[in-house]
Amino acid sequence: MAGKTGTDIFVLGLDDENLTTLRHIDMELRFHPLLSPEELQSGDIDLADLLDKASEQMAAFDGTIDAVVGYWDFPISSMVPMLADRFGLRSADLEAVVKCEHKYWSRLEQSKVIDEYPAFGLVDPFHDTKPPDGLDYPLWIKPVKSYSSELAFKVRDDDEFAHALDEIRDGIHRIGDPFEYVLSQLDLPEEIAKSGGNACLAEAEISGAQLTVEGYNDGTDIHIYGVVDSVPYAGSSSFLRYEYPSTLSEDMLDRAVDASRKVIRQMGLESVAFNIEFFADPVHEELALLEVNPRHSQSHDRLFELVDGMPNHQCMVRLALGLDPALPKGQGPYEHAAKWYLRRFEDGYVRKVPSAEDIERVQAHVPDSWVQIVIDEGVRLSEAAAQDSYSYELAHIFVGAHSEQELHEKYEQLLAGLPFEFDD
């Protein structure tokens, strides 16, 4: 466009919280919402229809589109390369993205270059009644494509395995069917084509401290810009907080970084940020890769901003524009940051959530904190969308601090000012 100043970027599923941090990127950028989070993540997902709607919206734009991006999981992570291809924009290759997203295909690729992964096997939830040969209880079973730990179950015996398959059969098609559409766009290896998008992965239980390696491949080299700890509630697999920077030993971090580089190179994932989740057992000096995500983690955006001075959204945006995506290091106001997940572990009817005034008051009391309520009044927790299999999210709480002790103290102060009421 003649006389154009600034850069126009379409963002799939743009929400207010992330728009705030996207605007902190030090560039003249204009962000345009492309479909709503509800359209993309709620109810049945008709991927072909969503792609057509997004294409129509982009085609109707009166100007030059410089990039299309997204920071959410499927279907957005798969839609970005498909839309980029339609409009001649920069993005990762769709096949490389799907190699990461299809949990069984991802394991097959990992096994070619690293040893740090659990024993695994494929399960047909509609016909199989036993775990794959060579896998013993306890184990985890999950669809080959899901998100937010949806339909992921830890099983300890045949009865729990059968119960998990019952639950999975009832819900697998919501994500599995649109994922089948993505798979249909590729020339797949025979084993992946046969398993499809409505299969399950079973894998041996792994344990230890959880960490996430964040980085990007700009086409010339693989860069790691941070490692975040994922701390669960005691006795649970549900996350209590994400904490940056990681508190694990340098040796364990180096091993996770080295494994990440090998896997990303094997996947052929370029021109996009990524995050890779691991379990680390420092006592036994063991490391196991849990999952490869072909996108950066938007849950960590404020953590990097509080500690390093810039949200990790910058990597996503600058990679899509073909620019150097390097983040600053240690230029934020704090040495530590965390995103806390306030959860309830029993079902209930939500009688009351904190008001806007409650949130404003506690945020004013605790500097550089942000509170996002993620549950609505008047709903039953078990009917809320996108929950994990064992808990219900109530709020996300971001905090910056100068020490780990201060992180905990600030969280407790915020918690005390957030009134929730439930009717059991």
Image: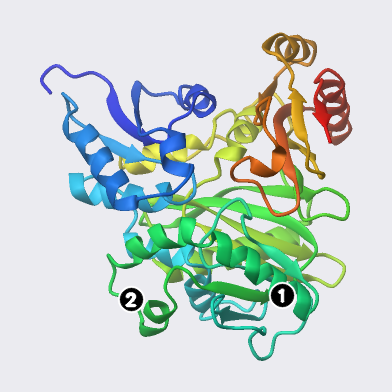
Q: Quadrant of residue 255?
A: bottom right
Pick the front one: 326 or 48:
48
For marks 2 and 1, the one nearer the N-term is: 1
Looking at the rendered image, the disc whose residue lies closer to the viewer, 2 or 1, is 1
**How busy is the neighbourhood of tag 2: few (under 14 within 10 Å), some, or many (20 plus)?**
some
Q: Position of residue 88 (x, y in %)?
A: 19, 46
Rendered view: 147 above or below 301: below
Query: What residue sits right under mark 2 in the picture?
Result: 188
* Residue found 42% across the figure and 57% down from its top: 221
Query: What residue sits right under mark 1 in the picture?
Result: 161
* Amino acid of disc 1: Phe
* Amino acid of disc 2: Leu
* Residue found 67% across the figure and 85% down from its top: 130
Q: Residue furthest bottom?
A: 133
Label 1: state its secondary structure.
helix
Residue at mark 2 to residue at mark 1: CA–CA distance: 29 Å
Q: Quadrant of the N terminus?
A: top left
Pick the front one: 261 or 40:
40
* Residue found 65% across the figure and 27% down from its top: 376
Residue 421 is at least partly visible in this image: yes
Rendered view: 393 above or below 250: above
